[in-house]
Amino acid sequence: MLPVVSVIWSGVAAPVRWFGRPSIREAVRELVGRRVLESRQGAGVFVIAHQPAEDWDKVLRRADITDVLEGRIAIETEAARLAASRRTPADLRTFRYTLADWRKASEKLPDDWYVESDLAFHRAVVTAAHNAILTELFDSFMPRIRRAMTDMLKLDQVHRHRHDQAAHEAIADAIRARDPELAATRAREQLSAVRSSLP
């Protein structure tokens, strides 16, 4: 705890003309939430740290990414299992095209192109399950998946996720081979590996 000179008196804020009391109260509330200030009933507000203990934006982004990945594991594992039994020649062609786009985007294109090509492949897997509910679930979830992937790439400066080509191809190969259990396992493993590698 910092010495008494670090106490913030509410009276100090009154003469400051360019900030209104609501703005100052909101700033104090935010800093209390980030554990830079501590509010004590009847005593005032005290500075307890010079900077936040953790980057809460980063913490919240990581939590949101984890939630999205867990949702994807639930949807895409079952979709891959069903796709292995129900896929059509058209589905296999779509895998070929989306994997080719994914490879190109992962090597040299900007993050937003990479995100879209990755989503296209994973949506192709879900679509190959030929289950309207799973497809609708995935489609309604896509804006959150897109946001989570973009945040994940910002957190991971080395972009490890751009280099999991073998994992994507293993999912497509298991579906092509009509092996439901292997397809489900590969889908779960790929997304679980992404989740475990979060910085």
Image: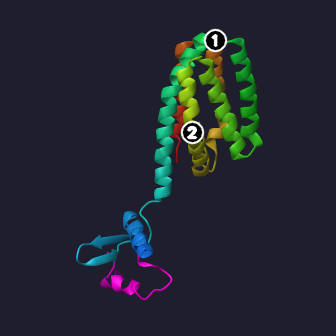
Q: CA distance from mark 2 to mark 1?
A: 28 Å
Asked if disc 2 and disc 1 are in contact, CB closer than 8 Å, the reply is no
Q: Quadrant of residue 114?
A: top right
- Left or right: 37 in relation to 192: left
Residue 185 in view of the camera: no
Residue 116 in view of the camera: yes
The magenta region covers: 1-21
In the image, which disc is placed on residue 166? Answer: none
Determine the residue positioned at 30% across, 71% down: 39
Residue 1 pos. (x, y %): 31, 74
- Left or right: 124 in relation to 27: right
Nearer to us in this view, 105 or 139? 139
User: Three-letter amino acid code at disc 1?
Assistant: Ala
Q: Is residue 5 magenta?
A: yes
Residue 24 pos. (x, y %): 42, 75
Image depth: mark 2 or mark 1 in front: 2
Q: Which residue is mark 1?
A: 177
Q: Secondary structure at mark 1?
A: loop
Determine the residue positioned at 41% across, 63% down: 53
How many numbered tags mark residues here? 2
Tell me the crowding category of disc 1: few under 14, some 14 to 19, or many 20 or more residues within 10 angstroms, Cα based: few
Q: Secondary structure at mark 2?
A: helix
Q: Quadrant of residue 42?
A: bottom left
In the image, which disc is placed on residue 145? Answer: 2
Tell me the crowding category of disc 2: few under 14, some 14 to 19, or many 20 or more residues within 10 angstroms, Cα based: many
